[in-house]
Structures are given as structure tokens and as C-alpha cells.
Image: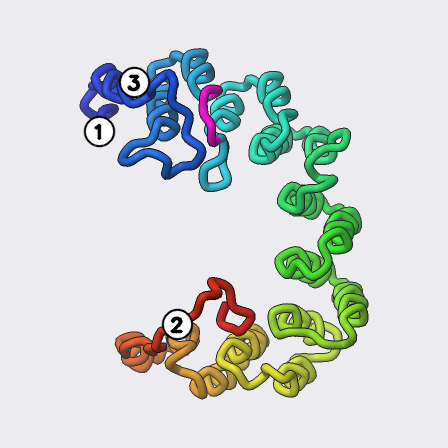
Amino acid sequence: MAAVADRDEEAAALLADRIPADHRCDGPWCCRGLDPDTAIGLLATIHERQGHIDEAIDLLRRRQITSVNSRDQLADLLARHGRTGELRAYAATDGHEEAVQRLAELLEEHGDVEGAIAAYRGIDGPVAWNPNSAYELAQLLTRHGRGDEAIAVMRAQAGAHPGDDWILHALSQLCLDQGRPAEGLAHLDALTATRGGEVDWELFWMRLPLIAACSGVDEAVERARVHPEGTTWYAAEHIARLLADAGRTEEAIAVLQQHDRRNSHDLAGYLIDLGRIGEALAILQQPGPHTPAVPTTDPWSEDPPF
């Protein structure tokens, strides 16, 4: 509003009053109302808009929390104004993985792919220990036709963090995308062996597209259905996706209809794909399932849904 009304100076003065010199928040919800870090970010935006880039940079260096929604405002500002050297120095600071990502993005945008890869790898850099940076590096390698290296990066992370489901899923999807589903299955089989052959659904479901690629959709569906959790509503979602991806949407709908109150969103989506709009609307307009609260002193549960 200040930008449209040409009242940046007034807005800047109001924001400056909300940045006490001696206060340090230890979290984004430390203060009631507009916390100092948010005020700093907004004031820096105004400074940048006015062309006061150095002032905006100095201000952002005072933040206690540097990453919001997986972006670093200072890193983005430095990148926008071509201050690559300062961005590189900032990215070298411990804990600034979003700045590393922005540096790599900037280098890739300018055609320096090797530089972008080096930004992630670094010397004892974040990719050595940080799965998020490793994932971004793997995506970068994949974009430039270096699938083998990408798989190696994620396989190393999967080995360092055994059983971490999102890393395993990323590795499995990468193997699938690169036409190497058997390798993804081999890694999951090795992990299963270390667990005595028992695999919960949260680690089992990611096998299904790999099995489908190796042995066909019917084999994957059958394997899913004989799993101890294969008749649950959350298993139905993955089975239906397998069938729908194979162009068997009617069968996907039939699977979900067995649990329509739990899977109403997915069921409606497949009905819409087939042009059955009225049925989809009727499902979406049904009241959702009500699960009575169960008193417990344990905030965590090992029983799905998680």
C-alpha cells in the first residue's frame, strides 16, 4: 500500500519504531504483533525499492532468523543486484543453506553449472551433511543430464540417514526418472534386510512405482494388496495412483470408493478427470469423517494416520 500511495517514508518510519536496538527474538513468534525480524524485512524491502541497497543489506544482517519459508531475503537481495562476491561470502556462513541454494541458482542462471555444483559441494560444505542441500544438488545435476552423479549424491544421503522416508522417496523417484528402477528397489531391499524383513507402509509405498516399472502395474497392485496395511484407506490412495497413472482411472475410482469418506479429495479428482462432475460435487459436499478425540498423555503416535 505504501508503494502504491507513494508513502514509503511514512511506512519506513513506522517500521523503524518496531525495531528496538536492544531486543533479540529467539523465535518468529517471540513478540506480540509485528516482531522485530518481520519489521526489519519489510523495512529492507522499502529501502531496496528506494534504491538504498547498502542500507537494506546492513539492516538484514541484523536479523536473528535468516530463513523464512525456505528463502533468505538477504541472499535474494544480493543475487538481484549482482553482488555475487558478497553472496558467496554470506553463503559460506554456517547454517545458511538457503544462501548456498540462491548462490547456486544465480550461477546456474549465468551458465556456470560447474560453479553451481561447487557451491553445493564446497569444502566440507553443506552437501556433506545436509540432505536438503544434497537434494538441490541432485536436482541440479539431473537438469544437466548428469543422472548418475545425482543418484550417487542421494544414495550417499540415504546411507547416512537410513530409514529417513523423504530421502528414500527422493532416491526412488530419481532412479525411476532415470530409467533405473531396479537400482531403487535394490536399495530399498537392502534397507529391508537390515530391519529383519519388516517394512511399514510409510516405507513400502515408494516401492510401488518401481515395481510397476520393473514388473508391471498388476504386480505392483498385487504386492500392495498383500501387505499387512494394504487394505487401509491410506494404502488405497497409493494403489489408486498406480492405476490412474497407467490410464486405469475407473479401477482407481473403484479402489477409493471402498474408503470414500477418507479419500474423498482424490476420489473426486479422478471423477473430474472422467467428466463425472456431479458425482465429484456430491462427494466433496459430504461432511468429513468425525474421529472422537482419544485422551492421551503422549503427543506422538506410531499408529497411522500420522
Q: Which residue is mark 2?
A: 295
In the rendered structure, the answer to whether residue 96 lies left or right of residue 159 reads: left
Q: Residue at x 73, y 55 (%)?
A: 158
Is any atom of residue 162 visible in this view?
Answer: yes
- Rendering coords of residue 109 (x, y %): 60, 31
The disc labelled 2 sits on which kind of residue? Pro
Q: Which residue is mark 1?
A: 1
- Rendering coords of residue 299 (x, y %): 47, 62
| Count of marks overlaid on the render | 3
Point out the tag, 1 or 3, that comes first from the N-terminus.
Answer: 1
Q: Secondary structure at mark 1?
A: loop
Residue 43 versus residue 105 in the image, above or below: above
Q: Residue at x 52, y 21 (%)?
A: 78
Is any atom of residue 109 visible in this view?
Answer: no
Please state the extent of the stretch shown in magenta in the rendering. Answer: 61-65
Q: Nearer the viewer, residue 10 or 29?
A: 29
- In space, the residues marked 1 and 3 are separated at their CA atoms by 17 Å
Determine whether label 3 and label 2 are within 8 Å by CB.
Answer: no
Could you say which quadrant of the image residue 87 lies in?
top right
Q: Which residue is mark 3?
A: 16
Could you say which quadrant of the image residue 173 lies in?
bottom right
In the rendered structure, the answer to whether residue 174 lies left or right of residue 256 reads: right
The residue lying furthest to the left in this view is 5
Question: Is 230 a magenta residue?
Answer: no
- In space, the residues marked 3 and 2 are separated at their CA atoms by 47 Å
